[in-house]
Image (cartoon, rainbow, N blue to C red):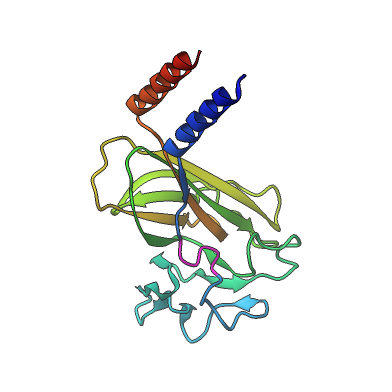
Amino acid sequence: MKRGMVGIVVAVAVLFAGAASGGEIFIKNASFEDDFIPWLESPGWAYSNGVVVRDMAVWDSSRVIVNDTTAGWLYSGSTIHAGARHPTAADYPNEVPDGHIVVYCWGGTFYQILDTDLASNTEYTLSVWAGWRVNNGAFDENGRLELWADGTRLAYEILVKPDTMGEFAQTVLTFTTGADVAPGQKLEVHVVASGTGVVEFDDVKLFATAIPEPATMTLLALGTLTVLRRRK
């Protein structure tokens, strides 16, 4: 193939790649480490004078959650079995996926409303690591990873159960939007424990990849063929 032809093919490939570009969407405190539970420098639990997770969820006198977005995450649920902890090596011999803090939950939801709007013609990939702590009883096999927008659930995946106690398993959810998406819908990520067992969560990530409409891909293909024919 001639050098000029190689350049054309490379340029077209770049066009196609650019048409399906994307990247990671920012989630505040995605691994539950930043500005979060400063007293958990050593392994322990985030319980102190009624505080479940500092600056995130506090139980009032009737044990109803009062939320604060300082640490990024909110909590919804009627159970007191929720908070943050620094696991020991006995809990997870291979350590936790990212950092040293996890959140635990039994019958509730940790969620975050993002600053990013739901986009049209976009594939979203949401992931989380769910842990089954040693000597922690049953793993919640009905727990879920969920993607929401503007207060509406778009898609969910049942959590992947770790092979054995003392391990984490990653759950991945994908969801693709169409061309018709109303503007101004803020994305939300939710990690849910149904109440049939305790789950410990870590390292939440969300990626977006723009997908060209079929008409755009057809025009790119036709343009490529036209250029190649002229070069012959």
Residue 81 in view in this figure: yes
**Foreground residue, 69 or 3?**
3
Q: Position of residue 141 (x, y in %)?
A: 55, 48
Q: Residue at x 44, y 22 (%)?
A: 224
Is 97 situated left or right of 118 in this image? right
Q: Main secondary structure of the magenta part?
A: loop
Q: Residue at x 50, y 35 (%)?
A: 14
Q: Position of residue 46 (x, y in %)?
A: 55, 78
Q: Indicate yes or no whether the magenta region holds residue 31.
A: yes
**Foreground residue, 100 or 177?**
177
Question: Which residues fall within the magenta stretch?
Answer: 27-32
Q: Residue at x 63, y 62 (%)?
A: 98
The image quarter in which residue 151 lies: bottom left
Q: Indicate yes or no whether the magenta region holds residue 131.
A: no
Q: Position of residue 210 (x, y in %)?
A: 41, 40
| Number of dots carrying numbers | 0
Residue 199 in view in this figure: no
Q: Residue at x 41, y 78 (%)?
A: 58
Where, quadrant-wise, is the N terminus in this rendering?
top right
